[in-house]
Image (cartoon, rainbow, N blue to C red):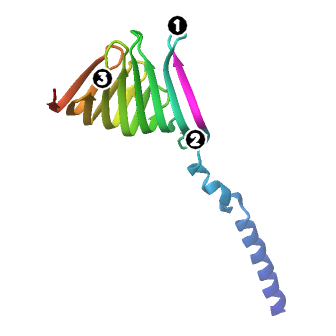
Amino acid sequence: MLFRIFTLIAVIALGVSTWILSSPNRRPAAAGGAGQGNLPGFYLKNTVLTDYDAAGVPRVRIHAERIDQIDHGPDVALHTVRFDYQAPNGQSWVMFGNQARVEAGGKIVQVSGDVRLEGQSSEHEGTAVVRTDALTYDVPQAIASTGSDVRIEFGAHSLTARGLLANLKERTMRLESKVNGRFQP
């Protein structure tokens, strides 16, 4: 009799533990889903993105070796980038960087890693080159800015400073602080 009671208790315990362990709240997440958040939602290789003005003329072209969606959200990361900007007055600017992050809506771009901004003009001989480690680019306003150290080179001349505000439409640059120039004949 004792054996039958013990067997009955063991069967009931097995049934209860099976029911508890098989409930949906106790099921472990699939192993494949654990790393899914680290993977990009989409990616593109060797891509050119073009932004047009109201008249349908290309305003900004972004070349990237790779573009990744960040954490399945609206932001994207670009790798080995080149931005070509054509100002309404005919002035062209080219910006290079190792990495860029485009915020949702595509209005603000954060460029980092060996950033270079070059003004290209047929009316002036040579080009000015701005070098820094990070730059923020406001696409609709065509304004590039940084609080980092900046070096501007124009032929044999160079300027260094901390901080820059460049209005690409108006072809103006303002150095913020610690400006130091070197002009050689």
Residue at image point 30% right, 23% down: 166
Secondary structure beneath dot 1 equals loop
For badge 1, the amino acid type reads Ala
Left or right placement of residue 147 versus residue 140 in this view:
left
The stretch in magenta equals: 45-52
Residue at image point 52% right, 20% down: 51
For label 3, the residue is: 166
- Res 152 quadrant in image: top left
Categorize mark 2 by other alpha carbons within 10 Å: few (<14), some (14-19), many (20+). some
Q: Compute the Cα span from label 2 to label 1.
A: 33 Å
Find out whether residue 33 is within the magenta segment.
no
For badge 2, the amino acid type reads His
Q: Which tag, 3 or 2, sits closer to the chain's start?
A: 2
Can you say whether 52 is above or below 4 in the image? above
- Residue lying furthest bottom: 2
Q: Which tag, 3 or 1, sits closer to the chain's start?
A: 1
Q: Which tag, 2 or 1, sits closer to the chain's start?
A: 1
Instruction: State the quadrant of the C terminus.
Output: top left
For label 2, the residue is: 72
Q: Nearer the viewer, mark 2 or mark 1?
A: 1
- Res 131 quadrant in image: top left
User: Picture coordinates of residue 76 (x, y %)?
Assistant: 52, 36
